[in-house]
Amino acid sequence: MAAPRSIADETVPALPRGVKFREDKARGRYVLLGPERIFEADPIATEILKRIDGKTTFKAILGQLTQLFTADEATIRPDVEALLTDLSDKQMVTL
Amino acid sequence: MSDTILLDRPDRAVTPQPQPPLGLLAEVTHRCPLRCTYCSNPLQLDPKSAELDTETWKRVFSEAAELGVIHLHMSGGEPTARRDIVELTRHAAEVGLYINLITSGIGVDDAKLDALIEAGCDHIQLSMQGADEGITQRVGGYRGGYEKKRAFARAVVERGVPLTLNAVIHRMNIHQVPEMIEKAVEFGAKRLEIAHTQYYGWALKNRAQLMPVREDVDRTIEEVETARARLKGTLVIDAVFPDYYARYPKLCNGGWGTRTFSVTPSGKVLPCHAAETITHLDFWNVRDHSLAETWYDGPAFTAYRGTSWMKEPCLSCERKHVDFGGCRCQALALTGDAANTDPVCIKSPLHDSIGTMATTESAVAEPGAATYRGFRAG
């Protein structure tokens, strides 16, 4: 995994063509899917990925997550950046 | 899935509870414009008259999604040879399957491609027989295929759908691996599979014509490694190397009845696409049983799932949970008993003879003409 990088507030994360985020009911989890690839999303990753719609800015996503987890932005921002930059390196998210 | 029913069964004590399957290889037809000598379809191909109808395939896809299948590999033969391929794709997308269309790219015009994408095709895997017209024609037995494939690849990329090229490698095209890597970049593919031939079906019949020499295999390993480093961020290259020259066997589809399964054009449910070569197994048909019943309790699935079927040297082997004794089809084809260890394994008494056979076959300068696949030649 590459070193986490910062993400600008105005960045709009999106799922590229061929990548889908969906519920995996049979196993009680959410998964991020690409060709020949399945990434299991843990509960926190699930909340992050649910908010990636190709319209919402990174800043707005952080705002929603701070409310959901009742944590301040400075605390959660590095974790969200780490997840999204890692997925970006794997071509599963565009930033 | 119904845990309680399964746990009530006494025979579950000897076989661990299997997980739901992740992938389904749907061979919707055996018809194909190409006649590749390495085709993994069985020698006895299903004729069109034996194919499942539209409604039955739709039910299969619904049951697969319900069972837990994530990826649907829509394959064949050439899947687009079915007139209802758009309808089948749409249904599979509606029930939530991730759809990977595995195609020769031949006979798929822009209108059909648009319809498939609109219906929900997520990813396209295009077969590549060679890096030019001559080799493509010689391998696939079809004139003009290379240009059609190039045009199809361009059409897919123009529409923004991710494209994987799948190149099956053997003696006739192994010298073209570097060119095929360059063509994959030129075509705009995101991924390339360099898959050395696995010897089942037509490939087993044509093994003497397909087996590459060891030096060529070693060279392609280096070529792939070099290209991977150079093309990082542009092209992902996944490689499968031939196991006849290996020390340990490959893990069959992630383990027999563990991750994936296949359904044949006529509805037989197989633990792997070559499993019909193990003729003593009883393969249930989607016409008679649900996919869930077949996956958890079908006799062909329970036969070699887990480790309880093993004999020595597998039984006491420290790798028995790593490769599960390798490939059952290969064990049967090369040793006469599907419960033997895969003979490519260094612990098999036949290991040395397999390597010798590959070396001897590949050293023959003029191995004769390969047999093109077809409905009557099997």
Image: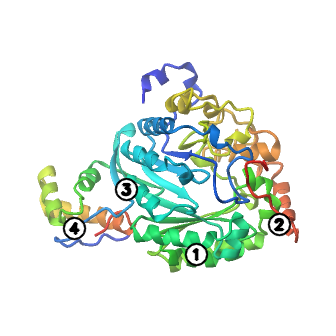
Instruction: Return the x and y of residue B314 as percentages of the image width and height.
Output: 71, 42
Q: What is the quadrant of residue B15 in the picture?
A: top right
**Amino acid bearing label 3:** Glu
Q: How far apart are marks 4 and 3 (CA)?
A: 25 Å
Residue B294 as seen in the image, left or right of residue B220: left
Query: Dot 2 corresponds to which residue?
Result: B362
Label 4: which secondary element = loop
Q: Distance between the residues labelled 1 and 4?
A: 33 Å
Query: Dot 4 corresponds to which residue?
Result: A12
The residue depicted at 54 percent of the width and 30 percent of the height is B296
Q: Distance between the residues labelled 4 and 2?
A: 54 Å
Residue A47 as seen in the image, left or right of residue B228: left
Q: Nearest to the eye among marks 4 and 3: give it.
A: 3
Q: Earlier in the sequence, mark 3 or mark 1?
A: 3
Residue B377 as seen in the image, left or right of residue B115: right
Q: Which of marks 1 and 2 is nearer the N terminus?
A: 1
